[in-house]
Amino acid sequence: MQQLLDRISRGESARLTLVGPSGAGKTALLEATAQMARSQGIRLQRSPEDDDPVGEAAEGRPRLVLIDDPDARPVPAGPGRGVLVTALESSGPGAELRVGGLSEAELGLLAPQLEPGARHAVWLASAGLPGAALPLADRLADLDASTDALVHLALTAPSRSGWLEVDFGICRLLEAAAQRPSPPAERARILARLAREQLGDASAADRRRRLIDEAVALARTSGDAGTLAEVLDSGLRAGWDPAAASERLDTASEIVDLARRAGHDGLERRGLFWRFVALAELGRLTAAEAALTAYGRAADLAGDGPAAVVVLARQATLALVQGRFDRVEALTAEVAARGPEVGLTDTANLVGTLRNHLAALRGNGETLLDSMQEQTRRRPGHLFEASVAWALVEAGQVVEAGLELERLLPAVLDGSGPRWLGAAADLARVAAQIGELTSVRALYDVLLPFQGRLVVWGNANLITGPVDEHLGRLALRLGAVEEAVAHLDRAVELEQRIGALPWLAHTLLLRSGALAERDQDGDDGQARDDRERARSIATRLGLSGVLARIEAPAEAGVWRLRRDGGDWLIEAGVERARIRDGRGMHYLRALLAAPGREIAALDLVAGGPGLQDSPGTPVLDDAGRAAYRHHLRSLQDELDVADRVGDGGRAAVLEAERAAVVSELRRATGTGGRSRQITDESERARVNATRTLWTAVRWVEAEAPLAGAHLRASLHTGRFLRYQPAPGGPARWDV
């Protein structure tokens, strides 16, 4: 600090940032520097907005600007002017001084009244940060001499970590306390808190379960209602099972009953909050809102400031569900203002989540990318990458999104925890647009047990729609249109019942497309009604994403493959890619220009019909063709019987077999019903055309994975090649 002041006194420019966690002493160092500056005749400026405290006569004297506000605008240093800034993380140019925790011996100099055991406990609990250590030291001064300071702090010291972050100081303290011999009730509380504090460690899931199992067993044998309520509460937080919403509701009721018997208001409030979360997960939002109101009233009566702010945040979440966007903005602003005042450590995350989700509902999902990537960096192992993948799709970065899908899918399929269901739903949205069918099927299977539920994240700080809406998207991608419509019907029913208008607009639009695909040759009146209702809701709520999809012209469903100089340009939905020229791209263009039509490999290789071929061996002789046709008549008779008795399953099997036989017969039959011939020329053409075409498809997959996946599912090769559009592709190709 003295070196900083010396540079300013010499008329030089200087800037220094004090970087460290809250409680490290950055403000104390800043104030100490201010005192040193005054004693040396250096004038001070407390913030960039302050007027220069000295008049014109003082012009030319060295000056130090002190900024102890992370939201203050940056100030450049200048000749004879220094800038001293405090920050939680590196944030700008200039030198940095990192400030961290003190050693145990240094802490003893600040709190000489502590005996060695108590000093060690305070050091563990505070991670050596003086801002946290000194209040704990004062608290221990009032304890009875017989009280074990380490165990006392292990059970009472506040955690400084936010949601899914680990306070390693508290964990070290709890680990030490767990080594001490303790009565069953006390040990149960220590183990339960240790499990709860390790929720942010994604690698500790098995250990958390073991700790909770032991803690619950000890608490039940202790006969202490308050201890059991505390342990059950910790167990719900530490051992989160996405499938156990009904059990969570039962446990919440048990916590409330036990807390009332023990006269513990705080634990009773925790039980009421868990009731809110479980009811939201089960889609019972009216009951959930009532439980949240009860929790809020209890918090107000107890003067629990952090709980009151949490209620505001969850009220904003429910307002988001209902599309009350003005109320969301007002409540979020109140959370941002009151959270820091009451010491709510997770305020920034709550506010960011609400604002990001509001932007996504309004159709600005691509703006979430930076925020999601920052969360992934700060909280590894909690599947934030799934939200990153979805944001990448929204931003049009489908190649990167596909890579994230491929990387993350195994972890999601094998995962659990408070964010798991939301992450699986986000990844489902990605897979439904650009995923391989195996990935789509895997996500469909893993989400299917949750049909009828809402996608609730963590402690219900975010709710992102019915699981059935995501299942409907996946079913459409799989070509299972009937299943998709059934899922979307259930999603619409739930959304209407709870008044979730933003989701309803999205689902109605999705269902209109599914109905139109299912009823291509019939009345599409329901599809039109869904589309118009989605338009009405989106217009009133300002859902620009829904409106853009509704108002897009018919040509929006057209994908394009065109020459551009020596290359090819492909435009497929959100994808834009340049592909190098090659013979396979010419073959691809010819097939796309004639969807559903077979083109002989000889013609494709020759660049047009008319290539002469030598006589060869028939692919199928007269007897073979007669056998195929007899089998077709038999299949048709069986189909008629299945239709008459209403056996839809049998009819579907027979129809699939009939289609396969017709395809084989078509391949073996040429113009006028004549048998096709196998020749050396045609075999060479088949091999060359097939190899060359699939090489071109791999080029497309590398640059435009959505288009590449569609082509791989739609192209059929052999002696005759065909582009038969698979579900999920364009309305048509412009070549």
Image (cartoon, rainbow, N blue to C red):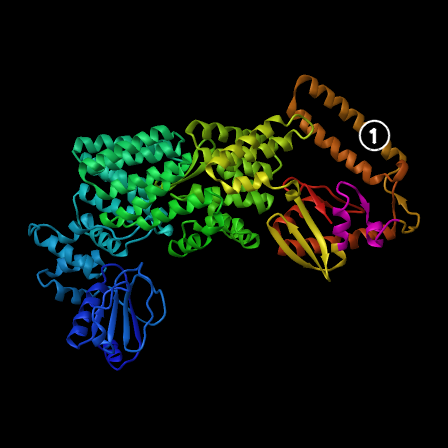
Relative to 326, is 452 above or below?
A: above
Farthest-out residue, front = 56
Query: Quick check: can you spot residue 467?
Result: no
Q: Is residue 128 left or right of residue 435?
A: left
User: In the image, residue 53 lies at what x, y percent?
Assistant: 21, 68
Relative to 232, is 37 above or below?
A: below
Farthest-out residue, bottom = 10
User: In the image, residue 684 lies at what x, y percent?
Assistant: 83, 54
Q: Is residue 321 left or right of residue 291?
A: right
User: Which quarter of the rendered picture does the N terminus lie within?
Assistant: bottom left
Residue, disc 1: 629
Q: Residue at x 50, y 36 (%)?
A: 538
User: In the image, residue 150 lies at what x, y percent?
Assistant: 16, 53
Q: Is residue 455 left or right of residue 666?
A: left
Query: Quick check: can you spot residue 505?
Result: yes
Q: Residue at x 29, y 39 (%)?
A: 311
Task: Check if residue 534 falls in the magenta segment.
Answer: no
Looking at this view, is 71 or 700 the one in front? 71
Query: Which quadrant of the view contains residue 460?
Result: top left
User: In the image, residue 25 lies at what x, y percent?
Assistant: 21, 63
In the image, which residues are magenta? 586-609
Q: Residue at x 20, y 75 (%)?
A: 42
Q: Is residue 663 left or right of residue 187?
A: right
